[in-house]
Amino acid sequence: MTVLVTGGAGYIGSHMALRLADGGEQVVVLDNLTTGFDWAIDPRASFVSGNAGDMDFVGDVIATHKISEIVHFAGSIVVPESVTNPLKYYANNTATSRSLIEAAVKGRVKHMVFSSTAAVYGMTGLDPVAEDTQLNPMSPYGRSKLMTEMMLADVAAAHPLTYGALRYFNVAGADPKKRSGQSSPTATHLIKVACQAALGSRAFMEIFGTDYPTPDGTCVRDYIHVTDLVEAHALLLTYLRQGGASTTLNCGYGRGYSVRQVIDTVKKVSGIDFAVKEAPRRAGDPPAIVAGAQKVRALLGWQPAHDDLDEIVTSAYAWEQYLLTRNR
């Protein structure tokens, strides 16, 4: 069996390729390197450069490498950008996924694992949200991902393809062995931005909105270590291979931290009191979203190994330090 990882040169995709190769899997990475990095690709994986939305090209990759499963990460992920440039998101996320799914059906791919998002829920409040919570995405990003979930459900009902959709909460941290991490200098992830500010790569960082209906007025999110996240993917692949039915699962820890709490943790870990400015809210940001994460534990036996904000921040900070030395 060979697994195709789309977006495998990116942040989460590169960690997935590492996890699969560590488990002895045959891995093919497909990436157009628009936001990914060729140096982040596990050397144990085969690499093909191209667009996951190019149906004929992907069909050739499936046939040449005898792909049996696809783990689909390729896409655009910045919520505020999706509000100002929605067509980019419906092209890169929805349309690309549609073409990829058709190539998978034509190539008789057995299973697909899809990188979805908690943004499909929209406005939720401080209580954890379960998978059966009403879906009401607040941004084109969330809607573009939800459309792909719907396509997968329809296609799985009509063809012999089973799938798993993992709704991510806020992914952070880096590989404990420092083989990969969030490497894009312009990434908008809160923990990365705060680490960059601590290391002087940014003169300051901003808090977008301080008047939300949360305990300290800033957004609350459920932060999950990237290594725990890709472990859930690996377990989901095993579940599907063993005949498990198509499923949709939240992937988070079930506990939220505010923006201010995260910044305070980065300051504690780094020992640096960097500059923080307050700014207006960003479009598309819900006040709070925390995972109801019982289903993924019960169905897959997933047991997080890095459920600690200090550990997440420490690994992210160490990766930023590495990037500074690498880019000199």
Image (spheres, rainbow, N blue to C red):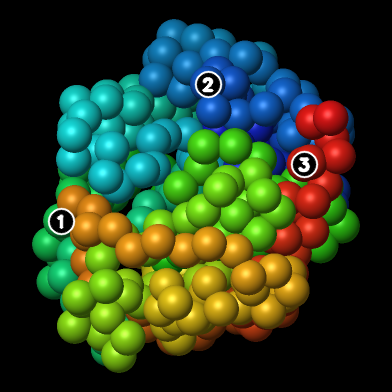
Q: Residue flagged by tag 2: what amino acid is it?
A: Thr
Helix, strand or loop at label 3? It is helix
Helix, strand or loop at label 2? It is loop
Tag 2 and tag 3, C-beta contact below 8 Å: no
Q: CA distance from mark 1 to mark 2?
A: 26 Å
Q: In front: mark 1 or mark 3? A: 3
Tag 1 and tag 3, C-beta contact below 8 Å: no
Q: Position of residue 218 (x, y in %)?
A: 31, 75
Q: In front: mark 2 or mark 3? A: 3
Helix, strand or loop at label 1? It is loop
**Where residue 272 is drawn, which disc sits there?**
none
Q: Is residue 33 above or below residue 284?
A: above
Q: Badge 3, how many Cα within 10 Å: few under 14, some, many 20+?
A: some
Between 292 and 86, the residue placed more toward the observer is 86
- Whether residue 273 is visible: yes
Q: Residue at x 60, y 55 (%)?
A: 197
Q: Position of residue 149 (x, y in %)?
A: 28, 49
Q: Position of residue 93 (x, y in %)?
A: 32, 34
Instruction: Quickly name the residue at label 2.
Output: 34
- Quadrant of the rendering where the N terminus is positioned: top right
Q: Residue at x 51, y 53 (%)?
A: 204
Q: Earlier in the sequence, mark 2 or mark 3?
A: 2
Between 303 and 201, the residue placed more toward the observer is 201
Instruction: Quickly name the residue at label 1.
Output: 138
- Quadrant of the rendering where the C terminus is positioned: top right
Q: Residue at x 39, y 35 (%)?
A: 76
Q: Is residue 176 above or below residue 271?
A: above
Q: Badge 2, how many Cα within 10 Å: few under 14, some, many 20+?
A: few
Q: Is residue 65 left or right of residue 23?
A: left
**Where residue 323 is drawn, which disc sits there?**
3
Q: Is residue 73 left or right of residue 174?
A: left
